[in-house]
């Protein structure tokens, strides 16, 4: 049974949005898809007429016993998380909002996940299905509201992280999970090298870890689960207990680390990679898999170091040549990606240039 | 005799080692079907590459000659996905079966596609790690096949499907390019082509190497068995466990015919008079498991279980699982033939759908045994029939098609984990509209412009659906025996 949580504000603008996109397709008008506009800074600016999707909002279906929630793309993340919390559940990927207006659609389009990512999976991992408008103004539906579904190619997961360049998300079904009964965050004073080693060792052991981060000479560990297990494992680690809002400050980038004039780099590395030889300040998150760097080092160096360690880098913020933002894509992959863009958006009108400079 | 074939064979010999090619008619029968044995086709010829470079060379040659290619792992697929093409090359990955690297620090395994699923966990065991997705066929099925089907297993509710446990795939496309999809990190730049490749049923490219995520073995596991004298009550208990905030590592259900068959087959000590049985496994830190075991037992009691049993030790736990994992062969002994279905539904509709299946069973006059991954709403009705009786196969197929129709009707899917293959290509028309199907074809074309990889599988033509659509209205059921399927 559909349950509209907020009948005052909920509305289905699906048809209207389809018409808008179809019209833009006919006239070859580039569109900039705008939700809460909280993530504009995460990528290159998009030129185009704004296509506002925040009006298309509302939780369409939520069955706590099914562990599935379906909501329109413009639904505020805050509304979804509040509704889940009322039933003792959560979005396991702990998405950052990066602003009060954050919507579900933007979160999925950017595939944003928080500190729990290494243990719970990414936003993409929790997508079960979606409906979307392609670049011709056609409405399509992929995946579904069930946990297992292997009919057809997995287009709904392809949409996660495609930054709206392959379609305008209309509604999204997600797998949700019960909230852990308890969480404890501990801090230990150790250096980056020792912290990486410690995080690796913990990752290979069956401990109820749900976040691991190093910053400013301190390793932060969060344990989640039943009280007895959390108390036991926290006891083994030692350290001092700190307030849980530390995680929010890292996830939302409100921590003072992020207010710095230097360019901000995001390095994705294998957890066992050593610290790259680059000058600057580091924040190690995701148990070592994500490393933030504030540095004036030349972009080419950063990309080169990340590549040599089996990973890659992305400049999230700060000046520098535009082509140094991300490393070059393998030419064969680029050809294929361009073909996929043509499949979904033949006129190239959706968030052009947001994902790949070339299209 | 066949000039094109001879020419291709001569060229293949130049790029493959001597034992990399099989052309003898008497041998080719070994590859004529996969686990869906009702669909058979002797391959034109078979190649057995040993390296990624071999695969690239074979695909380039086949593309030049316009020859279809069907990839094959262990051939345990249940939807005819690996069924050969009558004028195509069957590309077996059986010889690419090396575990290239287990990295106990990064918790990853890098493997060739022909590695058996269980072999990964066996190799990881000394490091206290394992590979979570565990299809019941895990002794035999390959990682390449798992990736192609996005296979699941009994532990998927908590640990996810193949797509959640694969970090990186090397995919060779029909033009011989070797693509790296995904990375050994937790987020990869660009479009998520890995998501498209997983579950693509061998239509987009050939998987030649995979990096898998390994997990630490849980500190402890506790298996609970609960018997019910009413199927609907067992179905409700499944929802109640999850509503209580517990995510079991596995939550499986069997109905009475399946219980009796499995018991006769492995003597697991199942209660053979129960209408339904639940197997609920809890794992994690000891303290968590102890606490949750108590909760679940209380929920099961309240849900009306007639018996609740804890596996006493690791031996009993393994035995109870063995009964479940052997359910297919066990049911296979009840009748000359069985037809394994694979639909998924919203969990809360379990009781209704079971009732629907029972009704259909009566209407078609064919018995059915049910096993499910109940926790994630994935049904496996096993339809019993005798292929030697006139029209029983056709009746079984029609019965199966109706079950899938029922799944779609309640908001589910025509396949939870076995894939579409040849078997369910008609039911794709029930689940998707013309726009989505056209989109699938366009994706296929982006990867494989000449449509040479596993042609005629997984996605029906719009024409075929239109034709079926009209027939569907006339006959009231999907006719699909004896019709060509593309
Ligand atoms: C008794 C039994 C129990 C089963 N239980 C389960 C279960 O619990 N869960 C589940 O999900 N499945 C189950 N299956 C189905 C089957 O085992 C899985 O689909 C398995 O992943 C197939 O692997 P395979 O190596 O046998 O692949 P095949 O059957 O050889 O091939 C399957 C498909 O994958 C393609 N393919 C194979 N290798 C490659 C490659 N390297 N690159 C590209 N494409 C490739 C083929 O073209 C084909 O389309 C079961 C089957 C049996 C017989």
Image (spheres, coloured by chain):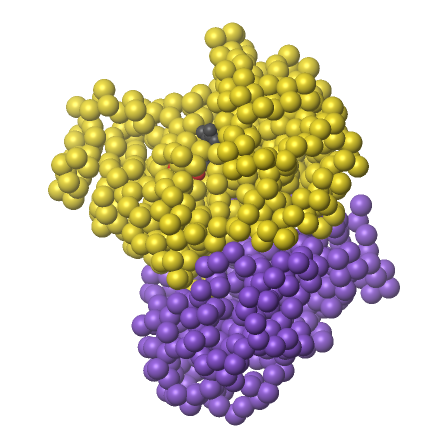
Q: Residue at x 34, y 31 (%)?
A: B85
Picture quadrant where residue A70 is located: bottom right
Q: Residue at x 50, y 33 (%)?
A: B315
Q: Residue at x 54, y 17 (%)?
A: B264
What is the tally of numbered marks visible in this picture? 0
Q: Position of residue B460 (x, y in %)?
A: 50, 36
Work out whether residue B70 or residue B123 is closer to the camera in this orientation and state it: B123
Work out whether residue B132 or residue B195 is closer to the camera in this orientation and state it: B132
Name above or below for residue B217 compared with residue A167: above
Q: With A185 as the anchor, is B211 left or right in this view?
A: left
Res. A172 in view: no
> As drawn, which residue projects farthest toward the top?
B389
Res. A207 in view: yes
Q: With A43 as the anchor, is B3 left or right in this view?
A: left
Chain in purple, by letter, is A
Chain in yellow, by letter, is B
> As drawn, which residue projects farthest toward the right?
A8
Picture quadrant where residue A170 is located: bottom right
Picture quadrant where residue B75 is located: top left
Q: With A306 as the anchor, is B234 left or right in this view?
A: right
Q: Position of residue A312 (x, y in %)?
A: 40, 71
Q: Position of residue B414 (x, y in %)?
A: 59, 35
Name above or below for residue A107 compared with residue A4: below
Q: Residue at x 54, y 69 (%)?
A: A237
Q: Which quarter holds ligand 1?
A: top left
Name above or below for residue A127 compared with residue B314: below
**Which of the image's four quarters has the N terminus of chain B?**
top left
Q: Position of residue A36 (x, y in %)?
A: 68, 73
Work out whether residue B221 or residue B335 is closer to the camera in this orientation and state it: B221
Q: With A215 as the anchor, is A69 left or right in this view?
A: right
């Amino acid at each position: 049974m559909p349950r509209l949580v907020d009948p005052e504000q909920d509305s289905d603008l699906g048809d209207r949005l389809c018409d808008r996109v179809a019209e833009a397709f006919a006239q070859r008008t580039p569109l900039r898809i705008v939700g809460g506009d909280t993530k504009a800074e995460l990528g290159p600016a998009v030129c185009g007429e704004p296509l506002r999707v925040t009006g298309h909002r509302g939780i369409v279906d939520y069955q706590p016993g099914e562990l599935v929630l379906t909501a329109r793309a413009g639904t505020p993340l805050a509304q979804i998380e509040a509704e889940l919390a009322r039933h003792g559940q959560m979005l396991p990927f702990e998405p950052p909002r990066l602003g009060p207006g954050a919507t579900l659609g933007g979160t999925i389009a950017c595939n944003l996940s928080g500190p729990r990512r290494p243990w719970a999976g990414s936003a993409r991992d929790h997508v079960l299905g979606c409906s979307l408008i392609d670049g011709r103004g056609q409405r399509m539906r992929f995946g579904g509201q069930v946990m297992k579904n292997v009919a057809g190619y997995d287009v709904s997961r392809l949409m996660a992280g495609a930054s709206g360049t392959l379609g305008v998300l209309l509604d999204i079904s997600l797998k949700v999970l019960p909230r852990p009964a308890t969480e404890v965050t501990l801090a230990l004073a150790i250096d980056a090298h020792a912290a990486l080693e410690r995080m690796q060792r913990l990752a290979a052991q069956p401990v109820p870890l749900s976040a691991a981060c190093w910053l400013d000479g301190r390793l932060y560990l969060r344990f989640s689960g039943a009280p007895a297990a959390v108390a036991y494992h926290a006891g083994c680690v030692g350290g001092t207990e700190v307030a849980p809002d530390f995680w929010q400050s890292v996830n939302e980038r409100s921590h003072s680390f992020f207010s710095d004039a230097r360019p901000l780099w995001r390095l994705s590395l294998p957890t066992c990679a050593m610290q790259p030889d680059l000058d600057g300040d580091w924040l190690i998150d995701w148990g070592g898999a994500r490393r933030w760097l504030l540095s004036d080092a030349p972009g080419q160096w950063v990309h080169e170091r990340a590549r040599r360690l089996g990973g890659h880098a992305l400049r999230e913020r700060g000046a520098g040549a535009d082509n140094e933002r991300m490393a070059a894509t393998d030419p064969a992959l680029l050809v294929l990606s361009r073909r996929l863009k043509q499949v979904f958006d033949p006129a190239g009108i959706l968030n052009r240039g947001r994902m790949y400079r070339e299209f | 005799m066949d000039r094109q074939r001879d020419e291709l064979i001569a060229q293949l010999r130049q790029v493959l080692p001597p034992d990399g090619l099989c052309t003898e008619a008497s041998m080719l029968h070994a590859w004529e079907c996969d686990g869906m044995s009702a669909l058979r086709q002797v391959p034109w010829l078979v190649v057995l590459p040993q390296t990624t470079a071999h695969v690239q060379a074979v695909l380039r040659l086949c593309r030049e000659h316009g020859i279809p290619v069907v990839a094959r792992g262990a051939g345990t697929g249940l939807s005819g996905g690996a069924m050969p093409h009558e004028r195509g090359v069957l590309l077996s990955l059986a010889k690419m079966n090396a575990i290239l690297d287990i990295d106990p620090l990064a918790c990853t395994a890098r493997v060739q596609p022909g590695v058996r699923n269980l072999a990964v966990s066996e190799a990881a065991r000394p490091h206290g790690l394992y590979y979570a997705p565990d299809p019941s066929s895990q002794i035999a099925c390959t990682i390449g096949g798992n990736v192609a089907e996005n296979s699941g297993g009994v532990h998927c509710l908590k640990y996810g499907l193949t797509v959640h446990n694969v970090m990186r795939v090397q995919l060779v496309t029909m033009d011989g390019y070797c693509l790296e999809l995904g990375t050994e990190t937790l987020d990869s730049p660009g479009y998520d082509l890995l998501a498209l490749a997983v579950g693509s049923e061998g239509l987009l490219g050939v998987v030649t190497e995979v990096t898998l995520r390994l997990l630490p073995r849980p500190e402890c596991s506790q298996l609970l068995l609960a018997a019910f004298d009413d199927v609907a009550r067992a179905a409700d208990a499944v929802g109640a466990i999850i509503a209580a905030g517990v995510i079991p590592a596995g939550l499986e259900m069997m109905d009475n015919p399946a219980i009796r068959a499995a018991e006769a087959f492995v003597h697991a000590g199942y209660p053979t008079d129960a209408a339904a049985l639940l197997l609920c496994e809890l794992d994690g830190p000891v303290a968590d498991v102890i606490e949750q075991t108590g909760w679940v037992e209380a929920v099961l009691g309240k849900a009306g279980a007639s018996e609740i049993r804890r596996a006493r030790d690791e031996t009993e736990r393994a035995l109870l699982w063995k009964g479940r994992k052997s359910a297919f062969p066990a049911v296979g002994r009840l009748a000359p033939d069985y037809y394994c279905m694979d639909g998924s539904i919203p969990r809360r509709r379990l009781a209704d759908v079971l009732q629907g299946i029972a009704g259909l069973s009566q209407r078609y006059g064919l018995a059915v045994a049910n096993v499910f991954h109940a926790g994630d709403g994935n049904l496996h009705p096993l339809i019993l029939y005798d292929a030697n009786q006139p029209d029983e196969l056709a009746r079984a197929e029609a019965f199966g098609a109706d079950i899938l129709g029922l799944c779609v009707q309640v908001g589910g899917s025509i396949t939870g984990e076995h894939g579409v293959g040849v078997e369910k290509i008609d039911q794709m028309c029930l689940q998707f509209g013309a726009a989505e199907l056209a989109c699938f074809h366009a994706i296929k074309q982006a990867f494989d412009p000449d449509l040479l990889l596993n042609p005629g599988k997984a996605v029906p033509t719009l024409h075929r659906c239109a034709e079926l659509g009209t027939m569907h209205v006339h006959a009231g059921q999907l006719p699909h025996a004896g019709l060509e399927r593309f």
